[in-house]
Amino acid sequence: MITQFFRCGQCSKETKGDWREDGAKTAAVNRAIALMVAVDSEPFCIVERRGFVNLLKILAPWYNVRSRTSVSRTDIPNLYEEYKKRIQNRLESAKFVSFTSDSWTSEDNRHSLLSVTAHWIGCEPEGTQNSRVLGVLPIEGRHTADNLSSLLSNCIAEFLGSEGADRCHLIVRDAASVMKKTVRLSGLRSIDCFAHQLQLAVYSGLRKAVMIDFDGVLERIKKFIRKLRKSGVERQEFIALQQLEEIPPRWLKKGIEVRWNALHDMIERFLENKAVIDIFCMDKSSFPKIAPAEYLIMQKMVDSLQPIKKATVMLQGRNVTISSVIPTIFVLRRALNDCGTEVSTAILLNLEERVEGIEENADYVVATLLDPKFKADFIEEPQQVASRELLKTKAEKMLAVVLAETTVNSIEKEVERSRPEQNNNSADFFEKYRCSQMPIVVSSTPPIDERMKLALEIEEYFRTPADPAADAITFWSQMSSGTKFPVLKMVSEKYLSSPATSVESERLFSMATLALTDLRKSMNVDNLQKLLFLKYNVPLEGFQT
């Protein structure tokens, strides 16, 4: 019945000739299947499954299903080149680009990859915040800084061109020494992933503060949860006790040490069930016993980790820029002080060590000041004057470059218009050394009147209070050329391009874990990098050609 419907209705005007091997309809279906394989992490063998073949026979009776070899060796590479070209075209109009980069190895050690994601404020449409994966690059041989630097530099050059380094603002990476050296060898500037720094500060702070063995407390919690999950009978008994104590029947959470928001949730949920756990363990010798002192430690952990959790969740947002880093430090400094426990004090001391210098760093300071929801409200009082001066200095430098380029271009055009036609050799002899042909020297600072305009522009910007509901990218996109903040808008496109964390690289590697299903374990690394590139970028670019 369904087959008859499609044949009589939708397909009644079609002929077998419309579905020839090189026809437009066949190409469209081939492309759609390849997109499905990439975006939905389907195995290549899906095209050989009987149910899938039957579905296509009903929908398109004259379509000849591609082989898995054709999909993997032809269709996926073609899609990769198509979307790669799209992203290259987008990046041509980007004035400044920032990046994240990280390395990853699969659990079976079959695949080692270096990720490179690009972040910029787009021009089409104006003021959009963009992120794309540029490369999921196979790492061959040892993971040395020299090897990784070569991969990183080649990838950026492939998308931005040989002179693209001039448009590179920052690379966000983790604090591993090999990644620091990798970026340094590439001749680019980089910053630490702030989320990683925050996690390390918490981990170190907890270890220093807790009198009873911190790892031991965590291990007893985890052991309790593991044993409870394994036994259906004991699990039902635990749920019955929750109902008796009128505690919401929410299950105990597992936590992972590398993500302290997960650790916070695990301990918090455990404390919520303290009464049930104590009763449950009374006649359960195989379950770990939790001492009162350990419950006190847990409560201090939860209280101290609460602001850290909020900060971590906020920083993981897809559009969070570097402008949030200094305000986050400002808030955590006060929140952890207000907490007043030895745990919060230890975390804060470790955090202060790790973020030393950030609040004077121009990349962070300028971005913070140019975010209309922050401005100078979260700059420590002694640093506010110096911070605004730093913004003025960076803005003057960028303005000088723009004015110099404008001057050179106008002079070159004027010289070209006034240059006489060369009709004899004597004229050629003199023209090479004419003064107007000599290199043009321009000032490295803007003229006084331009600097005064800039000072007034900055003064006007700070005259209005910060707006907590404002979005920085939207705010500056509304400042079209000729408005009252033309120079600051230009500066914002550079300093707000950088994300606060390398979370996009981590999301990509989470995709890699999902992509390497049991049916894809033997996939070669070339196919894997193309599939990950497409899985991330296709939903952002769109499915249509």
Image (cartoon, rainbow, N blue to C red):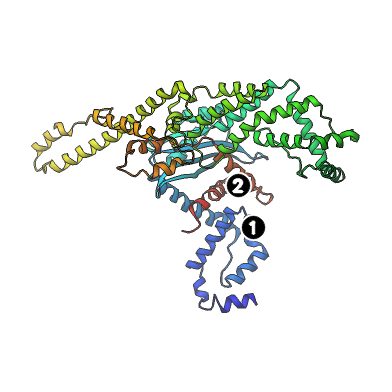
* Residue 396 quadrant: top left
Q: Provide residue 127's location: percent of width, then percent of height.
A: 41, 45
Q: Provide residue 173's location: percent of width, then percent of height.
A: 53, 33
Camera-nearest residue between 9 and 474: 474
Camera-nearest residue between 369 and 441: 369
Q: Considering the numbered disc 2 on the image, is that residue within a helix, a strand or a loop?
A: loop
- In this orientation, does residue 286 appear? no
| Mark 2 Cα shell of 10 Å, populated few (<14), some (14-19), many (≥20) | few
For the point 59% across and 61% down, which residue is it? Answer: 67
**How many numbered discs sit on the rendered protein?**
2
The disc placed on residue 45 is 1
Left or right, 501 with respect to 52, comes to left
Position of residue 158 relative to residue 4, above or below, is above
Left or right, 340 with respect to 133, comes to right
Camera-nearest residue between 507 and 341: 341
For the point 57% across and 39% down, which residue is it? Answer: 316
Q: Provide residue 160's location: percent of width, then percent of height.
A: 41, 41
Quadrant where the image shows the N terminus: bottom right
Disc 2: which residue? 524
The amino acid beneath tag 2 is Asn
Q: Considering the numbered disc 1 on the image, is that residue within a helix, a strand or a loop?
A: helix
- In this orientation, does residue 120 appear? yes
The amino acid beneath tag 1 is Cys
| Mark 1 Cα shell of 10 Å, populated few (<14), some (14-19), many (≥20) | some
* Residue 121 quadrant: top left
Q: Earlier in the sequence, mark 1 or mark 2?
A: 1
Q: CA distance from mark 1 to mark 2?
A: 15 Å
Q: Provide residue 135's location: percent of width, then percent of height.
A: 51, 43
Position of residue 167 relative to residue 521, above or below, is above
For the residues carrying marks 1 and 2, which lies nearer the camera in this image? 1
* Contact (Cβ within 8 Å) of mark 1 with mark 2: no
For the point 46% across and 36% down, which residue is it? Answer: 153
